[in-house]
Amino acid sequence: MMDISDDVLRDLHRRMVRIRQFEEGAGKLAEQAKLPGFLHLYVGEEAVAAGACAALTDEDQITSTHRGHGHLVAKGGDFRRMMAELMGRATGYCKGKGGSMHISDLSLGMLGANGIVGAGTPIAVGAAFANRYRDNGKVALAFFGDGATNIGAFHEAANMACALHLPIVFMCENNGYGEFTPREKTMAITDVVDRAAGYGMPGVIVDGMDAVAVYEAAVEAVARARAGDGPTMIEAKTYRYYNHHGVQNMGVQYRTDDEIEAWKKRDPISGLEARMAELGVMSADDATAVWAEVEAELGDAVQFAEDSPFPEPEALLSDVYTVMEGAAR
Amino acid sequence: MTTVGLIANPLAGKDIRRLVARAGSVSDADKMSILRQAAVGAAESGATRLLIAPDSQRLAVRAIAGLDLGLTIEVADVRVDGNGADTVAAARSFRDNGVGAIVALGGDGTSRDVAKGWLAAPLVALSTGTNNVFPQTIEATSAGLAAGLLATGVVPITSASHRAKVLHVQVTASSGDPAGCLRHDLALVDVALIDGRFVGSRAVWDPDRLRRLAVTTAEPGSVGLSSVAAALRPVDRTRPGGLSLSFGPAGTSIRAALAPGLFAELTVDSIDDLADQPITWSGPGVLSFDGERGMSLRPDQSVTITLRTDGPRVVDVARVCELAVEAGWFVK
Amino acid sequence: MTATETAVGEKSYVEAVSGTIAQLMREDDDIFVAGEDVGAFGGVFSTFLGLHAEFGDRRVVDTPISEQAIVGLGIGAAVTGLRPIVDLMFMDFVLVAMDQLANQAAKLKYMFGGEATMPLTITTTGGAGLSAAAQHSQSLEAILCHIPGLKVVFPSNAYDMKGLLVSCVREDNPTVVVKNKLLLGTSCPVPDDLYAIPLGVADVVKEGRDVTIVAVGRMVNEALVAAEKLAADGIECEIVDPRTLQPFDTDTVVASAKKTNRIVVVHEAVQFGGIGAEMTAQITEGAFDYLDAPIHRIGAPFAPVPFSPALEQHYVPNAAKIEAGVRQVLGR
Ligand SMILES: Cc1ncc(C[n+]2csc(CCOP(=O)(O)OP(=O)(O)O)c2C)c(N)n1
Ligand SMILES: [Mg+2]
């Protein structure tokens, strides 16, 4: 039970505020029809990405999901390149080729958002394998949703990671829904973590609306992985405020406004801010300053993205393969 | 109508102590089979109604669905928020709806929540949690049966139960003026004051951060904070009195099992008997109740802890069954 | 289109799916629908809207996100006598289910010496143009057509959707119905009563003497636009919509080639190894001596589907490319 230092608290807070602001900003742009394609917002789930990524080093790797912006922001993603990508610009993280669902930054160990549910988990297993192979002390952490634990790839990955005893953390974001279908229609269990024992790894539940709780569990799981003690599953109970994709909030068919309101009352950011104020770690003014700073960062990023050029048509055919010196084309 | 109440805490047995210690996990499937056994036992007793708590995962509801028990099954009409308050509300509703005895599945924290809702609850606590000092390992079938035999009056509760000790906790502003009480709470096994500021992942496992401890029970061989006290001065759950400890740099070093599979060394600075005299601790820190961090205490706040033997009527299942044998109940 | 006495109304491509399935389900209790979000939500493209309200949980099943098991569910149910319609939300997810599709559904009958029948219909939605990027935009029909045992239809309008869907569902072999995202909202006159368009029969959408455009799926609509422009220059295009890609109606296409002597083949999928390559080969085999110019193929470039509209607009074939292709084979 480590003592959560003031620095860690401020770090968790900043990571969450950056995610929230980026996502709200993206949502506004989507409403103005400035973002092409699908947009899966992470708002409400910030504590999970922030708590998990704060427990990782910059060198550790993560794999992500279709709801991936929060993961990249938490890993230290650059707003400018993220926003440019969401707008399909040449200056974006993926040069406009990937968009929201494929946003990635290999230099930060962020091995990609993913359009295929569950597909990130086997990739995290591979990264963990490479880490152990090279004995580099790095850990891989796979983010995935509750719905993703119903797909074969997840089960194969979990089993293989345990069989090979790899340095990996399986971080489940259980928000109670896969798209528009409640979890109880697609699983006979409620706690995803009940599955962990079936593969032979410990599994724990944490409050996914509490960054400190997520962080505590992630620190332990990452330490286990780094020490060679094998995989861990963490299930964070959380909630997405917006619709599966897009910016609709209240008034959806498949869940009640009351339910949404109840979760919003447990907002991870305002909850932490209140506690930090109480502890004297962050005054209301300090908090406002963080929001303002991040808002400025966002404004700059949106401006940068809007000023950025679209990719040239020739870019269509590049990057399909790595071009090797002297090889036949 | 003779009624048995059934509660399962879906959150029990799944917290971070599977990582920081070596606690095992209890799946929902396991909990549901225990619930079924208890329900069948209750039905066998001749009780006419089973009142079940609508936990957030509907464990009890799902477990009982499809069982042909031949008694009335009702779901307590209480709000479900997915936290400990659900158990508190269910226990309160059991009290108000004529429940003769409760079977509750969970750990120490679950029994505590039952007591918060119904202090004098007639209780059979089945351990499906992480730290189980208060609930004991009992066959669920027999637990259900015993609860039923009490509810139906085949066995009088006074002959097969003891009153549990309770640590009543009052949080006050630093003046210590009870009029300024900010919050009442209670614990059935232990209350601790820990260095730190966050409830976070709730469990307590770091020996270096323990400052104060009060226990109702200190049984050698148990696991958890109370085992620290037990290492120096055992106190049985059925005897009056508890203990109050403080920790510090100097004092008696002991080793104790702080969590399942986790021993730690602690330095006990003082250990005192705890009778009906209240003790007072002051913040800052985090208060843990029955092994789980529950609230943080500001520097200007303090807590007053009073030990009283006014808690749940803890059912001795074996004794109930013995008395039923004596009454010739099993002979049909 | 044959004249019918039944009422004909304007219906969308989406309604042609949901309405037709409802009609088929009313006739045959062995038909059920399963897939992700197909229940109360009605499918993410609304192609199953209203089915759950009418037929309930028994016959309209929300599945977990489990593409292999979704197809497997269909296979197992089909081979034991039901007539399943299962949905793979995006065509890209066909790849997730490929073993069940290609190694199981397609081959069971043959491997079992003809013993098995597999009245399984798989629906899926493909196509680019919505900035859905590389994993939500693909056109993978050629991969499916390569697997002996599967039949594949790709309706280009609501009328064909209804008729082909009826044939697929009534077919005793595994069929894949490819829907196209940009066609979902398009509509045309569609008879209210059920009617079947036989599998393996192409439709000459428009007759012409100068050039044949063989267009797949949504490209039929683009070809019509191109043909109109070309008509202004006195170029008369014949447009052939194969409708079914497997089995492929070689006769109709070859006959058209013999008539016009010039061919443009167009589909949205990647050109290399696309279904157009097979068509080109068949036309060459059947009408080599009649061709006055090399067959011109149009498809997507050899790259994944890009996200940015700035790139995607150059990626997806369109009327302008078809027009240019026609001018090229005509040399004017
Ligand atoms: C293989 C696959 N099947 C289906 C989908 C469509 N889809 C996208 S997100 C999603 C729900 C995922 O649910 P969950 O894993 O719980 O993540 P959440 O959206 O709740 O964060 C589905 C079904 C997909 N992208 N990939
Ligand atoms: Mg989910």
Image: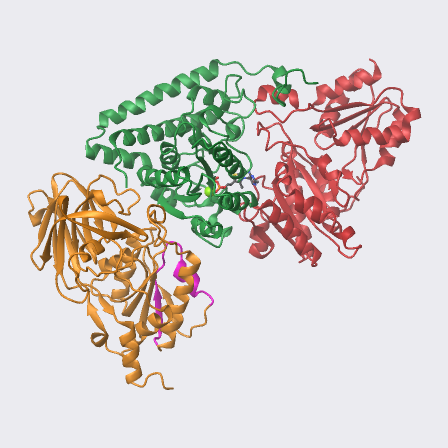
Chain colours: A green, B orange, C red
Q: Position of residue B256 (x, y in %)?
A: 24, 53
Does residue A120 appear to the left or right of B290 in the view shown?
Answer: right
Which quadrant does the N terminus of chain A fall into? top left
Q: What is the count of numbered marks? A: 0
Image quarter for residue A48?
Answer: top left
Q: Which residues are magenta?
A: B47-66
Front residue of C150 and B256: B256
Does residue A267 appear to the left or right of C297 in the view shown?
Answer: left
Evaluate whether residue C192 shows in this view. no
Q: Residue at x 31, y 34 (%)?
A: A269
Magenta region includes residue C300: no
* Depicted B315 relative to depicted A257: above or below: below
Does residue B167 appear to the left or right of A316 in the view shown?
Answer: left
Which quadrant does the C terminus of chain A fall into? top right
Q: Residue at x 24, y 25 (%)?
A: A286
Q: Position of residue B1 (x, y in %)?
A: 31, 75
Image quarter for residue C246?
Answer: top right
Q: Position of residue A72 (x, y in %)?
A: 44, 28
Q: Position of residue B199 (x, y in %)?
A: 26, 43
Evaluate whether residue B140 shows in this view. yes
* Depicted B35 relative to depicted C218: above or below: below
Front residue of C281 and B52: C281
Magenta region includes residue B61: yes
